[in-house]
Amino acid sequence: MTDQHDPDRAFFGRRKGKGLREGQAGRIAEVLPRLRLPEGEIGDLTALFPVPVEAVRLEIGFGGGEHLLHRMRESPQIGFIGCEPFINGMAKFLAVIEREGLRNIRLWDGDAALMLPRLPAGSLDATDLLYPDPWPKRRQRKRRFVSERTLALLARALRPGGRFRFASDIDDYVGWTLARLMASPDFDWADENADDWRQPYPGWIRTRYEAKAVREGRVPSYLTAFRRAS
C-alpha cells in the first residue's frame, strides 16, 4: 500500500525485520489485499465480513497475533479488525488464519491513527491496545500512540458504552495513558482500585512478550475505560 502522511500523526517503528520466506511473501502479495480494509470512507463495517457478525472489534498493533487469534476463535460471531504495520508479524498471522480458515477478520497494515477517521462513527464495539511500543526516552514520548488526538479518534469510532482496553508493563506509559484517559471528556475509567488493573482481563492469554516481561520482573497493568454515552 502507498504511504500516507498526516501532519498530526505518523507511524513510528519498524515496518520490516528479516527477509520473508517465499510462502510468507506470497501471502502478503495475495492474501493481505483480499483482507485489507478498502480505501476511502467505509460504510457498514459488518458488511465487510464474508460471514454474519454481531459487532466489530479492533486490535491495534497485534504483534504476533496470539491475543487476536484467541479472541477470534472464541467469538466467531464477532468481526475483528487487526492493525499491524510490521510486515513480519502480519505474514505469520496470515499463515494461521489461512490454515485455520478463519473468516471473521479484516486487516490494516498501516498507521491505525490514519484508519480510524475512515470508520463510521459509533461502529466499533471495543478496541484493544495491548503492549504498544512505550518509546521510553523523554524525547520519544511524542511517538506514543496514546495522545489526546488518538483518544478522540477512538472515542468517535466506538459506540456509546464501547470498551477500550490498554495493557502495558511499562509503568510510565501506564501513567501516561491513565492521565490522558482521566482528562478525556469521552471516556470513563472503569477500574476502582489497584487490584482491578493488576488482574488480567477475562479470558486473557499470556503472550510471549508478556511472559518475558514477567520473567524480567516487570508488572503488567490492564486498564479499562468505556466510551461515555454523552
Image (spheres, helix red, strand yellow):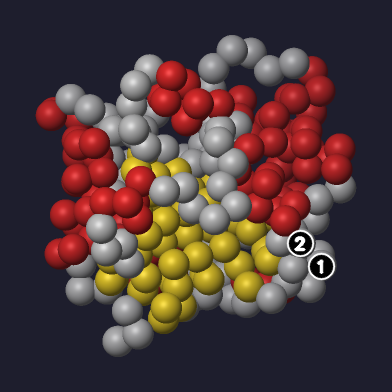
Q: Check the picture and name the quadrant holding the N terminus.
A: top right
Residue 21 is situated, as x and y percent measured from the top left of the image, at: 75, 16
Which of the image's four quarters has the C terminus?
bottom left
Task: Classify residue 29 as left or right of residue 214.
Answer: right
**Residue that mark 2 sits on:** 76
Q: How many marks?
A: 2
In this orientation, does residue 14 appear? no
Residue 86 x %, y %: 53, 31
Crowd rating for badge 2 (residues with CA inside 10 Å; few <14, some 14–19, many 20+): some
Does residue 13 appear to the left or right of 134 in the view shown? right
Q: Circle 1 sits on which residue? A: 51
Q: What's the residue type where badge 1 is placed?
A: Val
Report crowding for label 1: few under 14, some 14 to 19, many 20 or more residues within 10 A (C-alpha). some
Q: Residue at x 32, y 67 (%)?
A: 190
Residue 72 numbered mark, or none? none
Q: Say if 94 sits above or below 201 in the image.
A: above
As displayed, is residue 19 above or below residue 69?
Answer: above
Disc nearer the start of the sequence (1/2) = 1
* Image height of 201 relative to 131, above or below: below
Q: What x and y, as percent, mark residue 201?
A: 49, 53
Residue at x 60%, y 32% (from the top left corner):
64
**What residue is drawn where x is 64% and y is 13%?**
19
Circles 1 and 2: CB atoms closer than 8 Å? yes
Q: Quadrant of residue 133?
A: top left
Q: At label 2, which amino acid type do we have? A: Pro
Q: Nearer the viewer, residue 191 or 108?
A: 191
Q: CA distance from mark 1 to mark 2?
A: 9 Å
